Image (cartoon, rainbow, N blue to C red):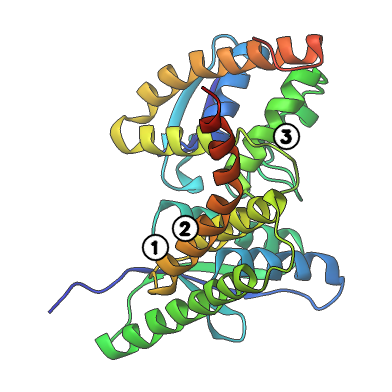
Amino acid sequence: MKWATRASCHVDRAACAWLIRRFIDREAEFVFVDDPAQVPIGVTPFDMPGAQLSHRGHDCSFETFLRHYQLDDPVLWRIAEIVHEADLDDERFDAPEAPGPDVLIRGLSMTRDDDRLLELTGPLLDGLYEYVRRATLLGHEPA
Amino acid sequence: MSRRTQWALLAYRIPREPSTPRIAVWRQLKRLGVAQLGDGLVALPLDARTREQLEWIADAVHQAGGEATLWLSQAASASQEQRLTAELASARSLEYQELIDEVENAAAPNDRTVQRLRRELRRVNRRDYFPPPERAVAKAAVEALAARFERPAVALGQQQP
């Protein structure tokens, strides 16, 4: 399946792309556009104004994906809080980790193109998933 | 002639009722530290983040049944631009001054006070596009307060052989 989002990915788009590949569509291909009107026919847009899989009410796009695909894994919902705060910084959640991914991915988007950015953020988010998974099982920070 | 700043302008109309989405939009604009150019017209210096944030707000206005358009533009004269940047700098300067006053008037400050002030300072920094001199003063004031709570612990440590 083909997916489209806005070029110059930041944390919400990077996390959504990771979520799609790991939990929704293993064969996902991504295209990057500057304008929602450039989305080719038959391609599913996300994290762009007007798309269904985008910001909804208080939710960032990552949260919208979790609701839409009914992904109720508590690990993903904790990652959603981090992504939400890194993206929107509205203090809806307590996510002290958020400024880290925010500046790291913002910096990557200055030095790498979108395809390379997603290649690099994929393993980072795998790591974050494993960390949060262990923290959730243990009930405290894993060593 | 120096290059003019590029601005992202959001022109919007949002229904008066229901008030919840209207107030949510107002809060988001306030958090971003926009310059109010007129009724339903706000501006921010253009960068990837400000543009994206204003796009989301435009989307929220649409979802609330309103109208919003985002424009990229520059002031027609240098003096107009200076007025706008001075207005933004002075709005932030007031916020920094409030922080400085809070540090000076803190009755019984503790490390929680420091955490709160650091958080508030970060919030103001995020919307500070044309830093006024008070930015450095506020940072120094908060860090000086923080140092007062770190020093005793260091002194205790040093007493041990």
Q: How far from the left and from the top, in percent, is residue A78?
A: 74, 27
Of the pair A62 and A30, the residue shown nearer to us: A62
**Label 2: chain?**
B
Q: Is residue B77 visible?
A: no
Q: How far from the left and from the top, in percent, is residue B158?
A: 51, 32
Q: Residue at x 80, y 9 (%)?
A: A137
Q: Residue at x 41, y 52 (%)?
A: B48
Number of residues whose C-alpha sits closer than 10 Å to that of mark 3, classed few (under 14), some (14–19) or many (20 or more):
many
Q: Is residue A140 visible?
A: yes
Number of residues whose C-alpha sits closer than 10 Å to that of mark 2, classed few (under 14), some (14–19) or many (20 or more):
many
Question: Is disc 2 in contact with disc 1, using a CB cutoff of under 8 Å?
Answer: yes
Location of mark 3 (residue): A63
Q: CA distance from mark 3 to mark 2?
A: 21 Å
Q: Could you say which quadrant of the image residue A7 lies in?
A: top left
Number of residues whose C-alpha sits closer than 10 Å to that of mark 1, classed few (under 14), some (14–19) or many (20 or more):
some
* Mark number, residue B46: 1
Relative placement, left or right, of B151 versus A85 is left
Q: CA distance from mark 3 to mark 1?
A: 27 Å
Location of mark 2 (residue): B51
Q: Which structural element holds mark 1? A: loop
Question: Is disc 3 in contact with disc 1, using a CB cutoff of under 8 Å?
Answer: no
**Label 1: chain?**
B
Q: Is residue A47 above or below residue A132?
A: below
Q: CA distance from mark 2 to mark 1?
A: 6 Å
Q: Amino acid at mark 1?
A: Leu
